Every structure is written in structure tokens, then in C-alpha cells.
Image: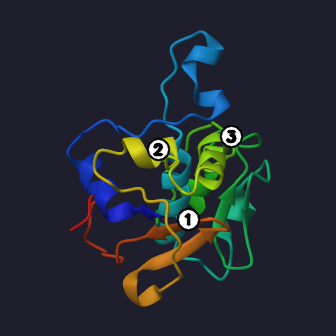
Amino acid sequence: LIDIEICYKCLAKNKKCSAKCSYFYHNSDILKVPVENNGIEKFLVYAAQYIICRRCEEKFCVTACPNEALEKNEKGILQRYSMRCTSCKTCSVACPFGTIYPEILPYKTSKCDFCIDRSNARLTDGGQGKPPLCVETCSEKALQFVEVEESPEKNIYLIKERVAIHGLPWNKEAKVGVPK
């Protein structure tokens, strides 16, 4: 569960995200170069798109993209294919609500494995293993490794098979990324 409200409050304080990621492509020890480890940002961006996107009936942003890098799934959730996106920003211009923010969409494309080694430890030692590294290292506790059910009344939405967000109610006057 990603709690967007907590995460955005932390970002509003200009704090650097403390959540670490053990995913192979985010690990500076393996790559032998300094790496800005922002594995959680991909989920944060996906969650932000889910909350911010107004889900237009006519998909102006999708139609405008010359590289077919955007698509909306059956729930109307905007999905960006990082390898196709050239950051031309035509989707931003086409969005009638101005809610596509290309500056928060990193080019990284990877898939979280929920720290499979740590997960296996949880299964083999009677549940005494450790949670995923991002959950353990998020100083504000915006990340939790728990089972939840979708509950629009509580602003909890399932955005992927194993990922849920606790979002903010939409506020027209709110600044981008800063909850009221």
C-alpha cells in the first residue's frame, strides 16, 4: 500500500525520499557507479496518474502522442510506455485539464519484484523475514506491505495486481503534489 497523502506531505517538505530499493537495476553495488535510487518513484508516478487523470471520454492525450507511448486501460487509467516516449510533451498540450506532468515521469522502466529474496525468507522462517526494503526504509511509513481491499470511500484503490494506493480526494485548488 502506498499512502500518497503521506508521501506528498514528505515531498512538500523538500525531503529526499528515504525509501531504498534492492531491485537489480537500482543497485549501485552491482552497476559499480553511483546510482540515484528512486525505485519507488515509478509507483508514485503511476499512482499520481491514477488520481490526477480526469479520465476523459475522448482520449486527447493518447490520440496526440506521435509515438503511441500512451494508452488507457479498460478502467481508464493512463499508462505510459517509457521506451516509446520521447518527451515531446504533446500529451501535456492535448490534455484539456492540464493534468499530465511530463517532468514527474522518469524514463526508467523496470518492474518491482517485491524483494523476492526477503519474501522467500518470510515464507521459510515462519513469517519472521523482513518486509520489502522500500517498506522498511521509508522514514515516513508511507509504504506498507499489507493486504487491502479496494475502498473508494476510504480513497483506497488497487492500481496493479499487488499494488494499492491510499489517495487524496481531488481538490481543484490544490497545488500539484501538495495536499491541502
Q: Is residue 59 left or right of residue 53?
A: right
Between 156 and 82, the residue placed more toward the observer is: 156
Image mark for residue 109: 3
Between 95 and 171, the residue placed more toward the observer is: 171
The residues bearing labels 1 and 3 have C-alpha atoms spaced at a distance of 23 Å
**CA neighbours of label 2 inside 10 A, class few (<14), some (14 to 19), many (20+):** many
Q: Which mark lies nearer to you, 1 or 3?
A: 3
| Visual colour scheme | rainbow
Going by the numbered disc 3, the residue's amino acid type is Thr
Residue in view at x 79 percent, y 53 percent: 68
Residue 110 image-quadrant placement: top right
The residues bearing labels 2 and 3 have C-alpha atoms spaced at a distance of 17 Å
Looking at the image, is 134 positioned above or below residue 25?
below
Disc 2 secondary structure class:
helix
Residue in view at x 63 percent, y 65 percent: 162
The residues bearing labels 1 and 2 have C-alpha atoms spaced at a distance of 33 Å
- Residue 40 screen position, x and y as percent: 50, 45
Disc 1 secondary structure class:
loop
Q: Which mark lies nearer to you, 1 or 2?
A: 2
Task: Write down the residue under mark 1.
Answer: 95
Disc 3 secondary structure class:
loop
1 and 3 marks in contact (CB < 8 Å): no
Residue in view at x 65 percent, y 50 percent: 124
Residue lying at the far top of the rendered structure: 32
Looking at the image, is 85 positioned above or below residue 72?
above
Going by the numbered disc 1, the residue's amino acid type is Cys
**CA neighbours of label 1 inside 10 A, class few (<14), some (14 to 19), many (20+):** some
